[in-house]
Amino acid sequence: MTNHSDDFDTDSRSFRDVGKGLLDEEMGPSSSLAHLYRGEIHRMKFWRERLDQTTNWAVLMMAAILTWAFSSQTHPHYVILVGWATLSVFLIIEARRYRGYDIWRSRVRELQRNVFAPGLDPSRELADPTWRQKLAEDYDQPTLKITMEEAIAHRLRRIYLPLFAVLLAAWTIRVTAFVEQSWPASASIGQIPGELVTSVVIIYSLVLIIIAYRPRTWHAYEELRTVDFRRDR
């Protein structure tokens, strides 16, 4: 007679031990690790495409607004400021997506630096001897690794500061060269005086520049930069 309890105990132990030794340090990159790496690359690529989509929407919106604003002298100048506000919304959306993208990119870089780079060149030292523990903790409890402000700064430096600059230049031309009134009175919006509108535009521009370029510790993992600003706290 077959002892089913023994079979059950054996199966239970096999399920409990299924992960043990799967990625031992003595092993080279196994098929499991290769599939893991491929999966992380796929997720990183998906979030990279989401970033590009947001940028494309922002550029299309800018093109439409600028075309309409300069198509007739009677069109109000403040539609360009509406474009500024819309561009700010796209910036926030893209910064949120960038924080998600950074999760997958940081994992990919851990594997590249500590598995594939030493595998290709055995004389190299491990970039981070504790990478296995850090990656295991990240898989156990995934977390966002950078702040919203840092994500906004990254996207401003890479994409959005030039876009804001284009809209600012277009608005400046629109309120100085395409109106009969003299500036800053030409910048008025209804009952809001032009001086106040101009002051808000200047202050907002300075805030964007400060966010993008103020000194900080960058936590975006292995971001491509000409200078390595990252440092340990």
Image: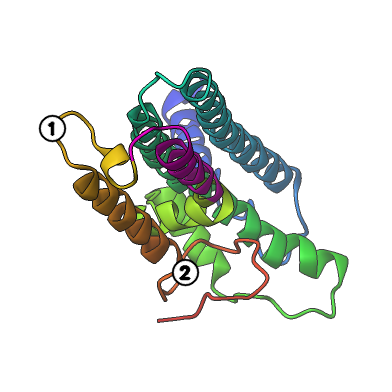
Amino acid residing under circle 1: Gln
Q: Is residue 177 magenta?
A: yes
Q: In the depicted view, which residue is nearer to us: 102 or 7?
A: 102
The spot of residue 80 in percent (x, y) is 40, 32
Q: In the depicted view, which residue is nearer to us: 142 or 226?
A: 226
Q: How is the image coloured?
A: rainbow
Residue at the image position 42 percent from the left and 76 percent from the top: 215
The spot of residue 178 in percent (x, y) is 46, 32
Circle 1 SS class: loop
Residue that numbered label 1 is attached to: 191
The crowding category of the residue bearing disc 2, from other C-alpha atoms within 10 Å (few below 14, some 14 to 19, many at least 20), is some
Specify which label sits upstream in the sequence, 1 or 2: 1
Q: Nearer the viewer, mark 1 or mark 2?
A: 1
Is 127 left or right of 197, judged from the image as shown? right
Q: Quadrant of residue 213?
A: bottom left
Residue at the image position 52 percent from the left and 27 percent from the top: 66
Residue that numbered label 2 is attached to: 218
Q: Is residue 84 magenta?
A: no
Residue range (magenta): 162-181
The reply to whether dot 1 and dot 2 touch (C-beta < 8 Å) is: no
Q: In the depicted view, which residue is nearer to us: 186 or 30?
A: 186
Amino acid residing under circle 2: Trp
